Image (tube, helix red, strand yellow):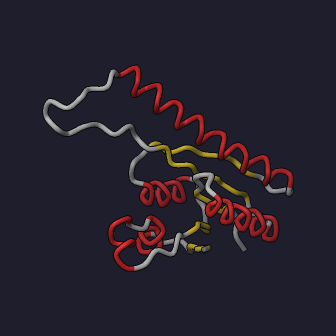
Amino acid sequence: MYQRILVPTDGSTLSNKAVKCAIEQAATSGAELVALYVVPRYPISYFEGGISVPDSEVARTEKQWADKGQAVVDEVQKTATAKGVKAKGVLARSDLVAESVISAAKKHKCDLIVMASHGRRGIKRVLLGSETQHVLTHSKLPVLVLR
């Protein structure tokens, strides 16, 4: 069946539902699990004369975000291992979440992506976007979407 399953997570309740499903699927099919957390880049002001943030503050904030992401994927790895699933956690640093998911799936030779969707519709979806929709339309791999 599946050899390696990618599950992007941000540690939220909704993404934890996808993690649980991915672990169950991996356990059933004997697949490995790759847990991905995408760490955002520090926002930089593009306005001339805007307040500049010291590089040390940017580095401190990005490290704090990366540490949080590492804790999230470590917890997924621990949970998967307890269920007998071989797992590893991966961090990606990018503001482009969907592209990072697709790229990680290719890099780690995954054959299934399991992810959550908020199920937004209408104007909320237009304004907030949908990383899941982007992955669905651009990935060449099967994508299992949970709500």
Residue under the point 72% across and 68% down: 21
Location of residue 84 (image quadrant): bottom right
Return the residue nearer the eye: 57 or 94: 57
Q: Looking at the picture, how far across and down is residue 2, in whole percent?
A: 70, 70
Residue 43 screen position, x and y as percent: 34, 40
Q: Residue furthest left?
A: 48
Task: Kindly identify the residue that appears in the image at 46 percent across and 74 percent down.
Answer: 120
Pick out the residue farthest to the bottom: 122
Note whether 72 is above or below 120 in the view shown. above
Taking 63 as reference, is 14 left or right? right
Tally the marks: 0
> Is 139 on the left or on the right of 81, as rendered?
left
Image spot of residue 108 (x, y percent): 58, 54
Quadrant where the image shows the N terminus = bottom right
Q: Residue at x 33, y 21 (%)?
A: 54
Percent from the top left, x then y, of residue 30?
A: 80, 65
Q: Quadrant of the C terminus?
A: bottom right
Along the viewing direction, whichever of 92 and 72 lies nearer the viewer: 72
Image height of 54 relative to 82, above or below: above
Question: Would you place residue 130 above or below residue 96 in this image?
Answer: below
In the rendered view, would you say 144 is above or below 99? below
